[in-house]
Amino acid sequence: MARQLGALGDANEVLLVPLPLHRWRLWSRGFNQAALVADELARVSGAPRDHHLLLRVKSTASLRGKGRREREKIVAGAFALAEGAKERVAARHIVLIDDVHASGATLRAAAKVLRRSGAARISALTWARVVPEALMTSNIFDFASLDSDMSDQMMTG
């Protein structure tokens, strides 16, 4: 992930923002795995991070097993910018950090808030990527047929 972060540009010109958990989920888990990943990326790269830029204002049901449209509905309106955070977003390259990229619905919902708040560019780095069953043939992953829904056009809009 650190190499991928380096490919996005100078570490001092990006701001790492872990996807927040809703306070109830954070309380039940005791940690935010995206925040832990962002902390380590910041340590090894020197890139600044901001754990308090985005808020998860809506508790959402688990997205596991849901279709793409249902996931989009569930996370719609789940994120908001923290009070006083608009100045920290304006004209910045924000790199969203999450643990798993499944459909991209959560990342898109967060990116939408950041884009409306004046972010110059929004990228995303995730620890893992869910492989749709349709792309699996035995134990072989067919990379050629993977059509990611996280294209630059969607994230930087």
Image (tube, grey):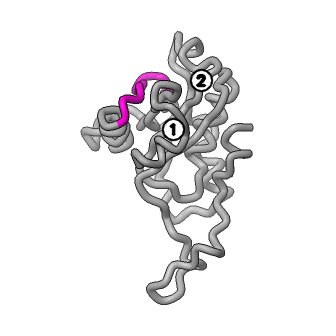
Q: Left of 67 or right of it: where is 101?
A: left
Observer able to see residue 35: no
**Residue placed at 51% from the left, 38% from the top?**
96
Q: For this view, does 28 lie left or right of residue 45?
A: left
* Residue 15, horizontal then vertical, whole percent: 49, 27
Which residue is labeled 2 in the image? 92
Between residue 58 and residue 92, name the one nearer to us.
92
Q: Amino acid at mark 2?
A: Arg
* Prevailing SS of the magenta stretch: loop
* Picture residue at 58% right of the left edge, 73% below the top: 143
Front residue of 35 and 39: 39
Task: Determine whether 66 is above or below 12 in the image.
Answer: below
In the rendered structure, the answer to whether residue 119 lies left or right of residue 35 reads: right
Provide residue 156's location: percent of width, then percent of height.
69, 38
- The residue depicted at 36 percent of the width and 29 percent of the height is 46
Disc 1 or disc 2, which is closer to the eye? 2
Number of residues whose C-alpha sits closer than 10 Å to that of mark 2, classed few (under 14), some (14–19) or many (20 or more): some
Please tell me whether residue 50 belongs to the stretch shown in magenta. yes
- Distance CA(mark 1)–CA(mark 2): 12 Å
Give the residues drawn in magenta, as a range: 45-54
Q: Is residue 105 left or right of residue 99?
A: right
Q: Secondary structure at mark 1?
A: strand
Which residue was labeled with disc 1?
Answer: 96
Pick out the residue farthest to the bottom.
Answer: 138
